């Protein structure tokens, strides 16, 4: 059964001008036969694996820096998770934390597009030399 | 290539691994398998007896059951992974409901397998985010 259904979570970056309503309508208009549920952060798309993969490719093509996506385990509107039906939402704190970081990740993807290279990692701060520590210990004794 | 992500339910890592052409191994697939086929309400908080026994492959019997339950789900994915991306120094809410002991066990299991592994710090600024994404891209492209 897991092979048949795929639910995708699409989250819009906080610095984007795309709205959840616009994204949900776009996915509807693609006509791939997937069910779409608009949410506060973007939308959920649910359907066969192949159809959802096509939707994902098209959304990435249209909004490469604005919309991020991951697979979701629970079906859209599942009463065990849906807050409209008082479901628990244990992963929501993480989604919120990641949502806040998405604008920065978009800047990273832009840097990838410009062909930049990562800066060399900063040298870790060295510890106090043993001799110096020994002097201090001797002075306090 | 199959790339394990840690935290295993991370949206950012799942998206980036998929975007750069690899198959992310995250928590969602194994949770969905249990929801659809066994009809558990809330894995890994609810697990089957088989999961608990399976978790013993990855953590001893003296380890708290919550960690064993999580490892019953993450462990087989770490076994199947050909590479891993780990995000370190993440805030408390970034991760599987903040179980630090499980995260440590996961990092240990990845290290023990000896697969290529990239550790990136959780970005606090735009410069750090650029570096993190560039390093993830370089690592994933280098996997072939």
Image (cartoon, rainbow, N blue to C red):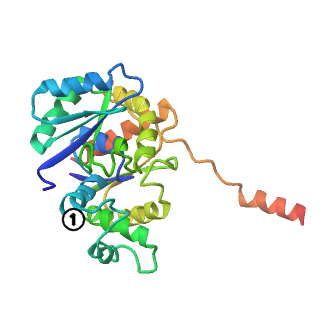
* Left or right relative to B37: residue B72: right
On the image, which quarter does residue A17 sit in? top left
Nearest to the observer: residue A4 or residue B73: A4
Above or below, A26 relative to A44 = above
Give the residue displayed 10% in from the left and 41% down from the top: A50
Give the residue displayed 48% in from the left and 64% down from the top: B101
Q: How many marks?
A: 1
Nearest to the observer: residue A134 or residue A68: A68
Q: At which x and y percent is residue A127?
A: 67, 54
- Tell me if mark 1 has few (under 14), some (14-19) or many (20+) residues whose alpha carbon lies within 10 angstroms of its own: few
Q: At which x and y percent is residue B114?
A: 33, 64
Spot the residue most to the front: A85
Nearest to the observer: residue A137 or residue B44: B44
Q: Is residue B122 visible?
A: yes
Spot the residue most to the top: A17
Q: At which x and y percent is residue B34?
A: 24, 61
On the image, which quarter does residue B81 sit in? bottom left
Q: Chain of mark 1?
A: B
Tell me the element at label 1: loop
Q: Which residue is mark 1?
A: B38
Q: At which x and y percent is residue A78?
A: 27, 48
Q: Is residue B26 visible?
A: no
Spot the residue most to the bottom: B61
């Amino acid at each position: 059964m897991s092979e048949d259904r795929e639910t995708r979570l699409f989250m819009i970056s906080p610095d984007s001008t795309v709205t959840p309503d616009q994204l949900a309508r776009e996915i509807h208009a693609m006509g791939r036969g997937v069910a779409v549920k608009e949410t506060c952060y973007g939308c959920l798309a649910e359907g066969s694996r192949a159809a959802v993969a096509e939707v994902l490719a098209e959304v990435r093509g249209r909004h490469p820096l604005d919309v991020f996506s991951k697979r979701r385990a629970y079906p859209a509107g599942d009463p065990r998770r849906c807050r409209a039906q008082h479901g628990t939402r244990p992963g929501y704190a993480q989604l919120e934390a990641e949502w806040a970081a998405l604008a920065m990740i978009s800047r990273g993807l832009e840097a990838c597009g410009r062909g930049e290279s990562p800066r060399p990692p900063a040298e870790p701060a060295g510890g106090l030399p043993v001799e110096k520590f020994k002097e201090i210990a001797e002075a306090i004794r | 290539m199959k790339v394990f992500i840690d935290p295993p339910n991370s949206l950012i890592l799942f998206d980036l691994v998929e975007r750069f052409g690899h198959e992310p191994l995250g928590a969602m697939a194994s949770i969905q398998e249990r929801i659809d086929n066994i009809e558990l309400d809330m894995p890994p908080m609810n697990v089957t007896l088989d999961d608990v026994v399976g978790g013993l492959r990855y953590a001893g019997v003296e380890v708290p059951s919550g960690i064993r339950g999580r490892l019953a789900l993450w462990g087989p994915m770490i076994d199947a992974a050909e590479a891993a991306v780990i995000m370190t120094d993440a805030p408390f809410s970034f991760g599987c409901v903040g179980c630090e002991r499980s995260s440590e066990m996961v990092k240990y299991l990845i290290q023990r397998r000896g697969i290529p592994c990239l550790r990136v710090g959780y970005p606090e600024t735009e410069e750090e985010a650029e570096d993190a994404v560039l390093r993830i891209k370089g690592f994933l492209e280098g996997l072939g």
